[in-house]
Amino acid sequence: MRRYFGRKLLIYGLTFFAAVTINWLIPRLMPGDPVASMVSRANLAQPEAVAAMQAYYTGLFGLDLPAWQQYLNFWGALLRGDLGISIWLFPTPVADVITRAVPYTLGLLVPAILLSWWAGNRFGAFAARRRLLDNTVLPVGYILTATPYMWLAILLAWGLGIVAGVFPVAGGYSYAMRPNLSWEFVGSLALHWFLPFLSLFLVAFGGWAIGMRNMIIYELEADYSSYLSALGAPQRLIRRYAFRNAVLPQITGLALQLGVLVAGALVTEVVFSYPGLGSLILKAIQNQDFFLLQGVFLFIVIGVLVANFVIDIVYVLVDPRTRAGMGAEA
């Protein structure tokens, strides 16, 4: 296992290096000058003052240096935990801006991922044994899993927010309130959280349900199921073994789908103006904030890599065949 996880760490390390390099390149390949955009918001009338301020901030952010030196400085600052200063919210550090937005994204993403995976697998396994559900309710899963996150979010906002008026359609909490520990504020948070969560949950739920349904049918038709049935084993025991084997590819699928779910959460936040990382990315692009964009992408890259590594560990723990294969290899 030490050798297995050593290889995994090497792969993730190389992936992290490549992802961070691309992360550094993307903002610099975007059109426009972020410093010029920042200076223009100052509404200076004198050209000399504009030129002096632009030169000052260009040097302050290190954008007057050669590209290779900017790249090395970026890695040096990153190893010190310094993500730079936000151009859009100058002089606020990028780390502080991201820290304020991360709880909203995690509070939206983590429950949607875990609950959709658990509920989708349970429902798919149940529907595989019930022809009525398999022929009626489960086909809705094909529609859900093929639905773009943004389009479903717009439909939910229109139906449950505008037409029904049950849930708010913008913000993380009521604009008339300030964050506090009162039950009123918590209730406002929950109301604003529900529609973004529901849009992510439904799309992911449909995919997990379909995948588990297909895997259960495959496992119930496998040789070991027929052998157990011939020995007179109860159907509950056979289905239990089938579920345990069918859930393993779903764990692998969870690792593969993390990036898709994170991307879905980001666009969903934009639809609902939810104050998470998705809205932050949009603001950073609109204001040409290189450092904020780099910081948000870096947090997402690290989060996805760490989550994938945790899933690799879980897979080894739940599948004894993997550990047996490691022992045979050693």
Image (cartoon, rainbow, N blue to C red):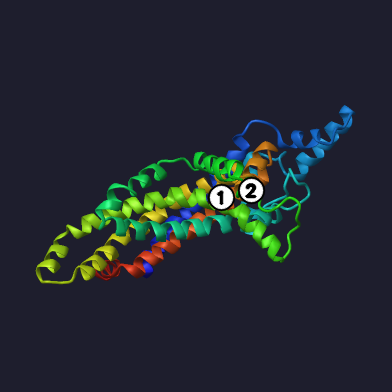
Q: Secondary structure at mark 2?
A: loop
Residue shown at 60% from the left, 49% from the top: 166
67, 228: nearer the viewer:
228
Q: Is residue 120 left or right of residue 107?
A: left
The circle drawn on residue 8 is none
Residue shown at 41% from the left, 62% from the top: 311
Q: Quick one: label 1, few (<14), some, or many (20+) residues within 10 Å?
A: many
Q: Quadrant of residue 288?
A: top right
Do we see residue 81 in this rendering?
no
Do we see residue 260 in this rendering?
yes
Residue type at mark 1? Leu
| Residue marked by disc 1 | 195
Q: Quadrant of residue 233?
A: bottom left
| Residue marked by disc 2 | 168
First of labels 2, 1 by sequence position: 2
10 versus 241 height, above or below: above
Spatial CA span between label 2 and label 1? 8 Å
Query: Residue 227 location in percent, x, y?
Result: 12, 66
Q: Quadrant of residue 2?
A: bottom left
Q: Is residue 282 left or right of residue 117?
A: right
Residue shown at 44% from the left, 61% from the top: 309
The reply to whether callout 2 and callout 1 are in contact (CB within 8 Å) is: yes
Q: Quick one: label 2, few (<14), some, or many (20+) residues within 10 Å?
A: many
135 versus 212 height, above or below: above
